[in-house]
Every structure is written in C-alpha cells, then in structure tokens.
Image (cartoon, grey):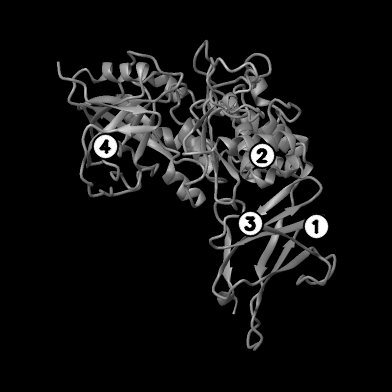
Amino acid sequence: MKKPHYLLLLFGLFFFPFSSPAQEITIGDSDFYEVSKIQEINLSFSEDNWQYLLDTLRKNSNRFLIGNLEINGAKYKNVGVQIVDDRAFEPGKKRNDLLIKLNLVNRVQNHQGYQTIHLSSARRDPSMIREVLGFEIARSYFPAPKANYADVKINKQPYGLLVNVENVDKKFLKDNFGDDEGSFFKVEPNLYPDPPAVCNNQVYGSLYHEKDVRCYLDNFKMRSEYGWDELMKLTDILNNRPKKIQEILNVDLTLWMLAFNNVVVNMSSYSGKISENYFLYQGEDGRFNPVIWDLNLAFGSLKNTGKGSDMDLAEMHTMNPLLHAKNPSKPLIFHLLSDESRKKAYLSHIRSITRDWFVSEKYLERAEELQRMIQVPISNDQNKYYNWDQFKGNIKQTVGKRSKIPGIQELMYERGRFLKKEQSIAVFPPKFISQEVLKRERLSGKSMKSFKFQVEVSKFTKRVDVFYRYEGESSFKQLALLDNGKSNDKRAGDNIFGGEVENKGNNLVIQYYFRAENAGLMSYEPSNYLLNTYKTSLKELN
C-alpha cells in the first residue's frame, strides 16, 4: 500500500516536507463564486484509500491529505485536503464537508486570489438552498460570505454537489474591512469542555465577561497572532460599560446580523442556544466586526433558542423579534437593545429584511430559481443525503419525522405575515424624498469650500443625521442635520434638513449616507449603506 502523503498542522504552524517554487496564478473565466455557474472541482490523490485516510486524519489529528486540484480546468499541485472539523462529521460517510488549502505547500498558490476553499455538504438542508439563499439575503445589507455550488469529483469518481462557501480569511477581511492584521476569532464553542472552576458554565460564545482568559479558550478559536486581551476588553465593556460599546464594537453591523438571524430563524448562531457560528474581526478603527457563518441550519432547521425545548412550526412563525432582549445571558442582545435608539435601529432592520424579501416573496422566486439551476446535478448525485422528492418538497413542506426540517415557504410565508403585522414593526418609517450635496450655482464666481447637505423627508420625521468619512478613513463621523432655516435647509419646519461638513482637501473624496428617525422606526439612504455609500468631492461640486 502506498504511504499516505500528508502534512502536520501543529500550534497553527505548517511544517513542510519539501519546498515548492512559486506557481503562476491561473485566473478562471468567471468569478469563482458566481451563483449562476456551477463550479467543477476535481481532486486527485495518489492513495486509493483516500476516504479512509481523510476520516482517520479528521478523527485523530489536524493533518491534511495532499493531492492535486483542478477548478474549471485550472490546475493546482500539492493542495491540502481535510474534512471540516464540525459536529456533523461521521466516519465512513461518502460525503462530508471539505476544506481545501491551495497554499499549504506553495504559499502563493491561489485561485482568483482565494487560497482556501470551503465545501459544505448541506447535511441538514434537504432543499440545498439554505446557505446560498441565506448568504445572498445577508449580503444585500451587510458584509457576508459569498456562496454558490460545486460539482465535486475525487479520483474521477463523483463525490457530490456541494455548497461552495467563501472562507472567512485574510482575503475576505481585506475585501470587506480594508485590512487583515487585527485580532480575529472564530466563535466555535466546545460543547463538552472542562473549564476552570472560576469560569461560568454554558455561556459558550455569548461574549459573557470572564476574568480568566482560560475561560475563553474552549469557545473562541484565535485566527490571528494576538487578540485575547482585546477580546476580554470587548466582553468587559459590553457587560460592564455598555454605554461605551460603540468604541470597540461595530454596533450597526451587529444589529444587522442579529436582525437577520431573527427574521430567518437562524438558531445556529448567536441568537440560538449555543451562541455560535460567527467570526469577530477587530479592524483598524479598533472596533470588532461580526461576520455570520454556516447557514446550513437557517430557516428553522435548528429550532432551539436556549429557552426550553425546540420550537414547533407555529412557535417559529411567531418567534418574538425581541428574542433575548430581557436575557442577560445573551449580553450582545440584552445590552444593545436596552438602548432605545439601538432597539429602534434593530427593529428597522428587521422590517427592511422582512418586507424586501419575505412580504414581497422575492425569497420564494429566488429559491425556486436556485433549485431549477441545480436539479440536474442533484438528480445525478448518488451520495446525496436526501432523495429527489425531499429535495423538491422542502421548499414548501417539512421533511423528516424526527428532525422535522421545515419547508422554507411553509416557515417564511407565515413568519413574514407575522412580522409585517407586529406592532413595533408595522408602523411606517420616515421616507426620503430627496437628498443632495449643494453644488456651486451656475455662473457663480463663488466656489464651494465645504460640503453642504440638504435632505427632504416625510412628515413627522424628528431627526436626520448624515454619517460621513473621507476616503481612506475607517470610521464614519455623525452630524445631526437641522430643520431650522439656518443650516443650509430652506424654511424652518418644512421637512428639509441641512448641515455642513468642513473640507479637508479639494481633491479628497467624501463618503456619506443618511439616517432619518421618527417616533417608531428609522430609515437609511442608501438602504444598503454598509456596503455602498454616496461619494462626492469639492472638485465635482465646483
């Protein structure tokens, strides 16, 4: 029998049996995460018993099996392959989640800039669309991984149609937050720890404050070279000085993540029993940014909130949008929603997601489109967990007698109706009628030397703010716009708000977005302001 070819992963360092020259980067014909294209991934190992070796390495060590990789015709040598370390792993199964590291041996090897590939087997998703659809919904509001599908073969034999989820790594951090050198953690609780006696039990990844760093080790996996002190500072401020939390946490991004989890009943998340499946990254501005992960169990596939037994379908339909708001063991929700302004923003995010995707039934149209796209490879997949009828049926109906994985439409039609009518969300938010940065008047010899904002909103709006930063800065500053007839608005009380930001340089680009608030909710312009903002410069205004 051939000797297995693998590498040891120890204390976060790779030990290489040989060196490899830099490989020329191969760029594919289309984006590796383009949803409309099913990726073709072929792995090859010199060992015939590769499946046994992958199982053994996963069970007994952190080592990778070395093989070769082909992605849509682009070839890569000496990649590392490993079954993903999660609770769903079962030895002997023909299909498991896979992690592929292109740069394990050759440090510069990548595919379109991606050095790690994460392939999900969708073990708890008969519909095969939860992750792709869920991440697509999330990405319409805030930074989240991309996801599509990959038809995977190993040693020329079909392995299965898997979900290809973008790995949250340095490339993701750089693309979404502008840098990749900060403290970085994956929240991955160990359900069977033996913590020191000084630690609180069963708080998992909830960000409950502990005074001993050992209490964090079983629940937070550090992905950076440092960070424990920073993580402990985050939990200290969150639990003991929550009024200062904006200094160390991207609160708005956090509220979006929590709102998303609640709307789509994603209990394999911070909002569920264990507080898991998210990352924390501390950017250049010193604030931690949460990133959602693993939506295989979204849309009610996991049903436990941490309060009592699993929810049934009716309970998921009517799950409280303020779930855990009075629960101090979930400090991220408890402390953030204790502030009325933040609670209003959170409820506004829930309203946006609900109406944009579920009241409109946009999610259903997209779900059916995704299933049509993958129905041929699914029908040919001999290793799939669910049969054809379960695959087709799980959009509309429950699959399974024991696990009872609800149909996505079966769950979200009624949940959307419930949230639409929920008193705290049913009120109308402010409406933006127009917004502009004033330009130099035609034929005027007086140039613009500052940025003068003017925003018209609907009646009963009590506050309008502009958030702005110069391009290259990491944090937005906040300026309250006024409707007093003296602030580049027009007449006092005419629902036109204005304000002025001083210039820092004629050629600098300023990025900005607006928030309007009435007695019940908030609105944002543009609505996807965490991903796209308005831009201008004095050069353009003159």
Q: Earlier in the sequence, mark 2 or mark 3?
A: 2
- Local crowd size for mark 4, using a 10 Å CA cut-off: few (<14), some (14–19), many (≥20): many
Q: Is residue 401 left or right of residue 209?
A: left
Residue 149's image quarter? top left
Q: Helix or strand or loop: what does disc 2 sit on? A: helix
Using a 10 Å C-alpha cutoff, classify the residue at mark 3 as few (fewer than 14 neighbours), some (14 to 19) or many (20 or more). Answer: some
Residue 8 found in image quarter: top left
* Mark found first going from the N terminus, 1 or 2: 2
Which of discs 1 and 2 lies nearer the camera? The answer is 2
Q: Residue at 64% of width from left, 89% of height from top?
A: 445
Residue where numbered disc 1 is placed? 459
Contact between labelled residues 4 and 2, with CB atoms less than 8 Å apart: no
Q: Amino acid at mark 2?
A: Ile
N-terminal label among 4 and 3:
4
Instruction: Report, in whole angstroms, how far the alpha carbon at label 1 lies from the one at label 4.
Output: 62 Å
Q: Which residue is mark 2?
A: 350
Outermost residue toward the left in this view: 1
Real-space CA distance between mark 2 and mark 4, rounded to the nearest whole angstrom = 45 Å
The type of residue carrying mark 4 is Val
Q: Is the Cβ of the residue at disc 1 closer than 8 Å to that at disc 4?
A: no
Q: Residue at x 57, y 68 (%)?
A: 536
Q: Pointer 1: residues within 10 angstroms few (<14), some, or many (20+)?
A: few
Q: Which residue is mark 3?
A: 476
Image coordinates for residue 151, horizontal then vertical, percent: 30, 32
Q: Are marks 3 and 1 in contact (CB under 8 Å)?
A: no
The answer to which of marks 2 and 4 sits earlier in the sequence is 4
Which mark, by number, is residue 517? none
